[in-house]
Amino acid sequence: MILPAQAGASARTVGADSGTWIVGGIPGEQTSQIATGTGATAIDRKLGSYRIDRGQARLLAGRLKRRGRLVYAEPDVSITPAGYPLDLLSDKQWWLNRIVSPSDVTPPAVGANSPMIALIEESIDPLHPDLLGARLTGARSLGPESDWHGTAVAGIAGSPGEMLGIRGVWPGARMRLFASGLTCSTASKAVIKAVNKGAAVINMSYTFPAGTCFTHFKATQYAVQKSVVPVAAAGNTGDTGNAPVRPATDPHVLSVGSVDDTSMIAPFSTRNDGVDLTAPGVGVLAPFVEESTNGGVKRTWKELSGTSFSAPMVSATAAWLRQVRPNLGSLQISRLLTEGATDLGEAGRDPEYGEGMLSIENSLSGPTPLSDPYEPNDDIRWVNGSLLVTRSPLLWRPGNSRYRIVTATLSKAKDPADVYRVKIPARRGITVNVTQLEGDVVLSALKPKAKKITRPGKNLIVRSNRPYPKTEGIVVRNLKKKPQAIWLALTPSKRQSGNDAAYRLKLVRR
């Protein structure tokens, strides 16, 4: 029961400023006469619902109440149109229509605590009309030659519907510039800073040659450890040799290729097994800045092509998913995006399209993916503190409960191994069983002094490699007088044909 005076007393009441009210009474002729006599208009007499001016609402409610006929009262709130806000150039945004239905899907409201998208760019022009009203912090301008790329990326990701240009994938999304500096060291530092400043998603629309800038690889693994979603452009080497590039090929980084307006892979889009999904990237209308003839800044819009402009579409969707499904980890968000992609090209995952083209609707409605805890744990050096300051916690240690169960996933392309640290009590042993839920996995146990899981040699204790769907099983005994920390490794079997695997590991103290 909400009446105008009550609503005015609480700023949190939805519709408190409404000029009209709805008052409902017990359906019948008596209610109808009271309502009509007070100046109300029937919404439906059979339901006993009436619309009345704000100033008369309390009077009508009082009259009905005295006759024992008052049922409810509420402000006549305005409806919120479903779908994306319109914008000046909406009719030219073919690319948005390919990844979402703008008339059917309503982006969530953005608040001060909404997930933040970190844009690792050289600079951004915050004065472009498409970014004037954006939730963009940290922006700096270095001039049109430097600004154009980052300005386009920011507009594609989160330009609000302000009737001055285009609509971003998540209109008004929280974004922050972290200056890339254009070198391996400065870009790596920007990624780390973004993680430390609370980014939920990191957009990396740039590349390094594969095999260079290992420092950046460490930075993205640090992001994964802190449950941040790293998204990268797949690269534009498709028609110039198709050389693989970092960070797109690195484990746990979502690599985004480009398609054109016919959903065909763009000739320039880099193709390899590391491509996770695609998004429009040919002729993408985006905010653009260039130097004018008089030496000033010309702020316009331009059709741009490149995987740089596909990546922010995925980044904005990832941030959107983090808001509406806050209980999911970053790798689960990544799997929602890939599992929800619209399959293109060959059936299933392929080097051109990855899992397919980004679909916001499918990702929003997708079932909860399996979690993948303890990442990054792709090899011993990521777990033992050699590369990341924080060691991965022990999967099991003496003093814990008698058993431990963990469910996790593998990917031949982006998550090729899971390594766990287990401490076995002195003179005791453990039994490890692995249920193969999807794909075919290998279970190995390695000695404490092992440094890597590939070619362990004499450091291999025991291995189980049974064909799917049989259960893998090993027994490891510690014959020493002190507890010993061993390594358990899960890897895809050579028999596995698909990219993905999932398993349930159960460890029991003997």
Image (spheres, helix red, strand yellow):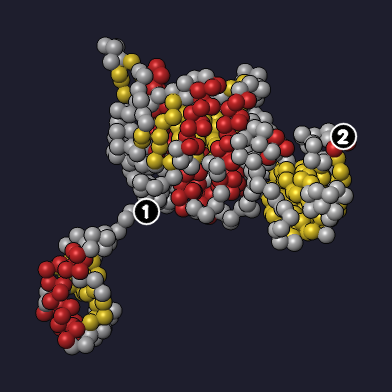
Q: Is residue 218 above or below residue 406?
A: above
Q: Residue at x 40, y 34 (%)?
A: 176
Quadrant occupied by the N terminus:
bottom left
Q: Position of residue 243 (x, y in %)?
A: 65, 22
Q: Is residue 211 above or below residue 405?
A: above
In the foreground, 159 or 192: 192
Amino acid type, residue under disc 1 in the picture: Ala
Q: Position of residue 302 (x, y in %)?
A: 39, 25
Q: Residue at x 64, y 49 (%)?
A: 373
Q: Is residue 345 above or below residue 212?
A: below
Residue that badge 2 annotates: 457
Q: Secondary structure at mark 2?
A: helix
Residue that badge 1 annotates: 82
The quadrant in which residue 470 appears is bottom right
In the foreground, 210 or 166: 210
Q: How dense is the environment of label 1, judged by Cα within 10 Å: few (below 14), some, or many (20 and up)? A: few
The quadrant in which residue 136 appears is top left
Pointer 2 or 1: first along the chain: 1
